[in-house]
Image: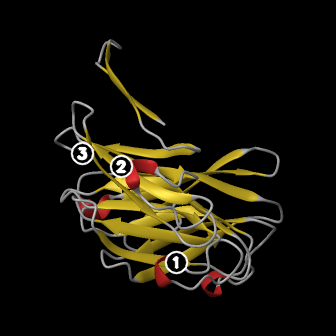
Amino acid sequence: MFVMKLDSLGAHQWTILRGGSSVEEARGLQVDASGNVFVAGYTASTDLDSQSNAGDFDVFVMKFDSDGAHQWTILRGGSGDDFAYGLQVDASGNVFVAGFTASTDLDSQSNAGNTDVFVMKFDSDGAHQWTILRGGPGDEFAYGLQVDASGNVFVAGYTASTDLDNQSNAGDFDVFVMKFDSDGAHQWTILRGDSGDDFANGLQARCATTPSDVVLDVKFFDRVDEEAALSFTIGRPLILW
């Protein structure tokens, strides 16, 4: 994988490469207020930055300073495949990572189906804080992640389960949005879809004048690739449009 920095005019500042003996895929990137760069993805290497791989693909999180100097790398995984896609850093420097896993033993968590959603939290030094898994009997895939000013975590993706968190599935794959508090406790899950396939591919937060006006926007595509969007208030799963 590589990380590249350009200035505001597009002039190249630096490029770094990082990898092991096999495949690395970088999927999520965030820059904090100090210019530190955090990257999340997955690796099949057994020797990435002297870290041990627990399965086929493991989650990695890396930190670089504003000059591109490597600070740390952590790997996290179970006996199956683990894929990280979403990454966010909060105001305290905590790092949140979301993705999906086929492991039955990721951080001693039970997998409810074939592929489950996971959310992980690390502190600013990369120390693991917690991991949660969420899923139904079918497949769940998480791609979007946002963290609000209070540390609440929002995850978006899609599911083939017919009873994810007691929600009804309208089609083959439905869009889901989940909320967790800062300790990883589940708050709510909502599903949205029609009779076909619906795939969520991102999650963004937008603010009006106060924190209570924060709205989550979920973009998704249906079976015929028609783009649509949902919006939710931050406090409760109210669909705005």
Question: Where is residue 71 shown, x and y percent of the image?
Answer: 25, 46
For the residue pair 40 and 77, the one nearer the viewer reads as 77
Q: Tell me if mark 2 has few (under 14), some (14-19) or many (20+) residues whose alpha carbon lies within 10 angstroms of its own.
A: many
Residue located 83% across and 66% down the image: 195
Q: Earlier in the sequence, mark 2 or mark 3?
A: 3
Q: CA distance from mark 2 to mark 1?
A: 22 Å
Q: Residue 157: where, in percent of width, then height? A: 60, 61
Figure quadrant of residue 226: top right
What's the amino acid at mark 2? Met
As drawn, 177 above or below 17: below
Rendered image: mark on residue 62: 2
- Residue 80 falls left or right of residue 63: right
User: Quick one: label 3 or label 1, which is nearer the N terminus?
Assistant: 3
- Mark 2 and mark 3: Cα distance apart in space: 13 Å
**Label for residue 32?**
3
Label 2 sits on a secondary structure element that is: strand
Q: In the figure, residue 117 lies in which quadrant?
A: bottom right
- Residue 143 visible (yes or no): no
Nearer the observer, 17 or 152 = 17
Above/below status of 130 relative to 223: below
The x and y percentages for residue 213 are 32, 59
- Proximity of marks 2 and 1: CB atoms separated by less than 8 Å: no
Residue that mark 1 sits on: 133
